[in-house]
Amino acid sequence: MRLRLKTSILILLSYVAAITLGTILLVLPVSSAGGKLSLIDSIFTATSGICVTGLVVVPTGTHFTLFGKLVILVLIQLGGLGIMTFSILMFLSMGFGISSSHRWVIQESFTHTPTPDLFSLLKSIFIFTFLVELVGAIIFFFHWHKDFPGIQGVFYSIFHSISAFCNAGFSLFDKSFGDYRGDTVINLTLAFLIILGGIGFFVIYELYDYLRRKPKRFRFSTHSKMVILTTICLILFGMVLIYAVEYHNHLLNFPSPQKLLMSFFQSVTARTAGFNTVDLTLFHTSVLFMLIIFMFVGASPGSCGGGVKTTTFAVLITLMWNRLMGRDTVNVFKRTIPQELVRKAVSIFVIAVSFITLITFLLLITQPEVKINPGSEGYFLKYLFETVSAFGTVGLSLGVTADLNWLGKLLIIITMYVGRVGLLTVAYGVAREKLVGPYQFAEENVMVG
């Protein structure tokens, strides 16, 4: 436990250091074209960047200068792959060794099994990231070269490719991708980048391994099976629900192919990316509630996204199914999930719900508009949506981000930070070392259910 405690503190401090540096750079007059950014807004933007969230208090495309946008882009790239990942790769490239605690960070971040050749793993991750972001940028550039000629087109293409792959949701367009809601190339390219960035590097490696081998000689791990199946089910379920509920509502005046494209894109981006091609405030309440669930689930372990993760959600669903079937063990794909992992999944879920409940409650009692107009149930949905979006590092909003007072912004900053570094990392960092002893108390039943 001592090793994990030290490592957790190291992770927490590395993000604090990055946020501090980003804040210093963003608060400089050279970063802003539309007036100097306040300290709290600079902290908010730096946190949103390094935590790959995408919530903004000022328009990214018009408020920031090229320097400010470059600062945000660097924060997104650092936050997407993890600050410790960059640091460790740099040390390994220079021939320095790393401690066992640093090795534990990488293995916990990108793979569920010990990796003997850590340098090769990190190098593969960086090469894959660079290639995917390059392909995305090339597609964007050739599609946008008439609208954004020259160096502007290059920068716009690189910025949005990195933002999409890192599941950050930052856009240089004031209406996100609302003007491209019917553009198949832009929508599918963004979705392709978001899915690859959110599915996890271990799963991508297994998919690559499967393609280069004969299928009969290869078996996907239970982890990859759960991630792929859960991801597909969530995307399809979200697309069908948005299409069905909004068909005669917000999507009424769009042709059917465009309705499908918009439904698919919003289902993909809702879990971690935060881009949008529609006005979310016009969505039916049932769709907004589904989006809250999607943002809460988030991406997959070892990826650029946040949330409680798809595998946590899958383990809980599997646990419920096995209990209904009368089994004491949690079985899936002819394998049994270890009880320690099941307990971890339950702990993550309970802590996450408790944390989101607390932040939402604090927002409701600290924001001026709620005090002026008490009793409106619309505030609860808006602030719950904002909180879950920050926790899942998504970046979608119902339009309340810029109107938050300094205390509300601080609460969202904390939520983005906790959502990115992980609830258990925070718990390990602040909790006391576990007491180990040969004793336990006598058992006694209580009534539940």
Image (cartoon, rainbow, N blue to C red):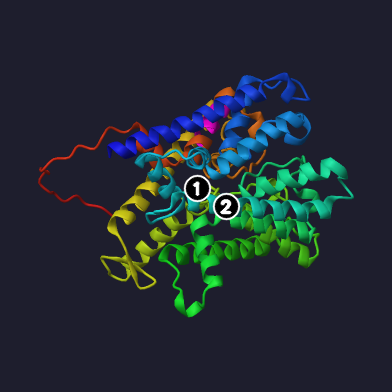
In the rendered image, residue 381, in percent from the top left (x then y), is placed at 57, 43
439 part of magenta stretch: no
- Image quarter hosting the C terminus: bottom left
Q: Quadrant of the N terminus?
A: top left
Say what secondary structure mark 1 lies in: loop
Q: Which region shows up in magenta?
A: 409-415
> What kind of residue is marked 1?
Gly
Residue 212: horizontal and vertical position, in percent? 55, 71
Q: Is residue 217 above or below residue 381?
A: below
Residue located 57% across and 52% down the image: 271
Q: Which mark is residue 204?
A: none
Counting residues from the N terminus, which is met first, the one under dot 1 or under dot 2?
A: 2
Q: Is residue 303 left or right of residue 150?
A: left
Residue 232: where, in percent of width, then height? 56, 65
| Label 1–label 2 contact, CB within 8 A | yes
Question: In this rendering, would 39 be left or right of 178?
Answer: left
Q: Is residue 438 left or right of residue 247?
A: left
Taking the image as drawn, is residue 408 in sight? Answer: no
Q: Nearer the viewer, residue 419 or 401?
A: 419
Question: Which residue does the image show at 66% across and 25% down from the upper left?
Answer: 26
Q: Residue at x 68, y 63 (%)?
A: 243
From the image, give the main secondary structure of the stretch colored magenta.
Answer: helix
**Residue that numbered label 1 is attached to:** 307
Closer to the camera in the image, 374 or 436: 436
The residue that disc 2 covers is 271
Depicted 191 relative to depicted 275: above or below: below
Image location (x, y in percent) of residue 368: 60, 25
